[in-house]
Structure formats: structure tokens, C-alpha cells
């Protein structure tokens, strides 16, 4: 398994992606092999110190505390920093030296606002409750039985706006693997994830994290058909998914037409 390189992000405005922008992103993104914060962790072995002498009649030393289960925050910190206490678990039938696809934020999906911006493009800054931005992201990959298996970690931040306060929101994240992003973009696999975020009464901003496991897809046919992994906020996709879950309204029966007794009959 090969870990991808961590990427830190700065917020950007709403805009559409152009082919030139995609090409520039491909040139600027670093390859996934090699070191960095996404590199596999190693556990250093050190010589154990000799046990201290125990005096006769002394109380036995206290038993070591049972290891606690790592929280999601610990897992994401370990994912980004590579500082873990255990070796990564090997993936069965995985091929070594795998190059992960590039990872980037889909332009136009780098910022999330609650409520959404007005359709006319006007600036309603004082009505803003919350704004979401990406902080950093990373990925690692393995090839299992001819398919790429990827894990993507995302860290973002919710900033409380002038009209915001304590509450709970759902952050709609989209992860999409796209082939040939410059010549003929085609979606290979896509996932919509909803991340719950709770904002306290005294919070000015709250960080959120998500690790998406088991993102699998076929390997590219050739090096001329590269893949790129996009992440972004997708409130419109979430709204469309919610609308699709609603039952269709029942059709009203057509009123029956009564015959007219005064109508001519011949």
C-alpha cells in the first residue's frame, strides 16, 4: 500500500472549472509516492531499560492502564501525520508501489454556505449562519485483484457567521473519481457523504473530519487516460437526493362525466 501526499487547502470563491484550470491543477499536484505527511508510518524499536530493583516488602507496581479505543479525531490525525503506534494493516493480495491518482478540490465546490447564496448573486453577508471550507486532505491506495482501492481523508472547518449560533448541521461532501479530466471527462465512481457537525454556544468555528474507506474502481486503461480524485461540497446533490426519497404525490382521479339528458340523440 502506498500513501498519498497530504494537501492543505485555502478557501476560494465560487467559479466553474475550465480545461486550463484542470491542466494547471495536474501540473501543480505532487505525485502520491514518496514521503510527507501521508507516508506509511514506521515504529522505531528501542532497547528496553533494565527493571528497577524491588525492595522486600514493597507494594507491587500498579498494573498498566488498558489502552483506550482511538477516537475519530485521533484516527484522522494519525492518517494525516503518519504518527501511529501500530504498523498499517496489510491489504490482502495488494500490489506494492502503487501510484495514487491526483487529488484536488472541484472548483466551484470549495465553499459551503448556510443558507445558500441567493440566485441573483447578491451579497447577504449579515444573513450568513455558517460557512464551510476545506483545510486539508490526503489519500492512500492499493491495487487488489486488478482494482484500485483508495482511502480518502478530509478535514474541514465550519465558521460561524453573523446570523449563526449553536446548532447541528449536515455537511454534504462529494468524492468523485474522474478519468481523462482534460480531454473527455467521465465519472468513474462518485459518493455523497453527509457529515454531522455540532456547533456549541461559544464556538466561533468547528473542525470536522471524515475518512472514506473502500473507494474501489477499475485501473485506468493506459497512462494516457489518467484519473483524478475530486472532493467538494455538494448541497445541490444532497437536496436532489432528498427530493428523490420523497414519495410521489398521489394522482387525483378524473371526475366522471355524466350524460346530458337533453342532448339530441339521432
Image: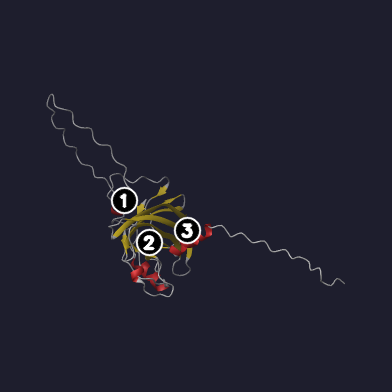
| Cα separation between marks 1 and 2 | 22 Å
Neighbour tally class for label 1: few under 14, some 14-19, many 20 plus, Cα within 10 Å = some
Query: Which structural element holds mark 1?
Result: helix
**Left/right of residue 262 with respect to residue 78 in the rendered view:** right
Q: Pointer 3 and pointer 1: residues touching (CB < 8 Å)?
A: no
Q: Pointer 1 and pointer 2: residues touching (CB < 8 Å)?
A: no
Label whose residue precedes the other's in the sequence (1 or 2): 1
Residue where numbered disc 3 is placed: 189
Q: Nearer the viewer, mark 3 or mark 1?
A: 1
- Which label belongs to residue 103? 2
Residue where numbered disc 1 is placed: 73
**Left/right of residue 88 with respect to residue 193 in the rendered view:** left
* Viewer-proximal residue among 222 and 18: 18
* Viewer-proximal residue among 233 and 126: 126
Q: Where is residue 193? Give x, y as percent.
A: 43, 56
**Left/right of residue 218 with respect to residue 259 in the rendered view:** left
Q: Where is residue 212? Give x, y as percent.
A: 40, 53
Query: Which structural element holds mark 3?
Result: strand
Amino acid at each position: 500500500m502506498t500513501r498519498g501526499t497530504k494537501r492543505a487547502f485555502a478557501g476560494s470563491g465560487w467559479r466553474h472549472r475550465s480545461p486550463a484550470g484542470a491542466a494547471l491543477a495536474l501540473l501543480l499536484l505532487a505525485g502520491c509516492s514518496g514521503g510527507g505527511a501521508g507516508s506509511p508510518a514506521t515504529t522505531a524499536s528501542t532497547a528496553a531499560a533494565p527493571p528497577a530493583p524491588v525492595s522486600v516488602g514493597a507494594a507491587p507496581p500498579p498494573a498498566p492502564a488498558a489502552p483506550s479505543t482511538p477516537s475519530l479525531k485521533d484516527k484522522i490525525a494519525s492518517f494525516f501525520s503518519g504518527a501511529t503506534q501500530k504498523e498499517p494493516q496489510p491489504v490482502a493480495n495488494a500490489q506494492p508501489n502503487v501510484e495514487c491518482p491526483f487529488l484536488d478540490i472541484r472548483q466551484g465546490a470549495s465553499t459551503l454556505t448556510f443558507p445558500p447564496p441567493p440566485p441573483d448573486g447578491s451579497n447577504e453577508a449579515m444573513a450568513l449562519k455558517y460557512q464551510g471550507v476545506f483545510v486539508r486532505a490526503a489519500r492512500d491506495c492499493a491495487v487488489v485483484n486488478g482494482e484500485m482501492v483508495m482511502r480518502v481523508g478530509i478535514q474541514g472547518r465550519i465558521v460561524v457567521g453573523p446570523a449563526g449560533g449553536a446548532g447541528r448541521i449536515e455537511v454534504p461532501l462529494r468524492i468523485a473519481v474522474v478519468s481523462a479530466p482534460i480531454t473527455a471527462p467521465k465519472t468513474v465512481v462518485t459518493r455523497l457523504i453527509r457529515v454531522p457537525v455540532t456547533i456549541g454556544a461559544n464556538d466561533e468555528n468547528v473542525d470536522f473530519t471524515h475518512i472514506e474507506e473502500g473507494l474501489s474502481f477499475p485501473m485506468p486503461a493506459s497512462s494516457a487516460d489518467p484519473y483524478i480524485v475530486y472532493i467538494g461540497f455538494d448541497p445541490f446533490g444532497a437536496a436532489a437526493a432528498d427530493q428523490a426519497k420523497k414519495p410521489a404525490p398521489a394522482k387525483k382521479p378524473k371526475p366522471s362525466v355524466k350524460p346530458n339528458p337533453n342532448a339530441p340523440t339521432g
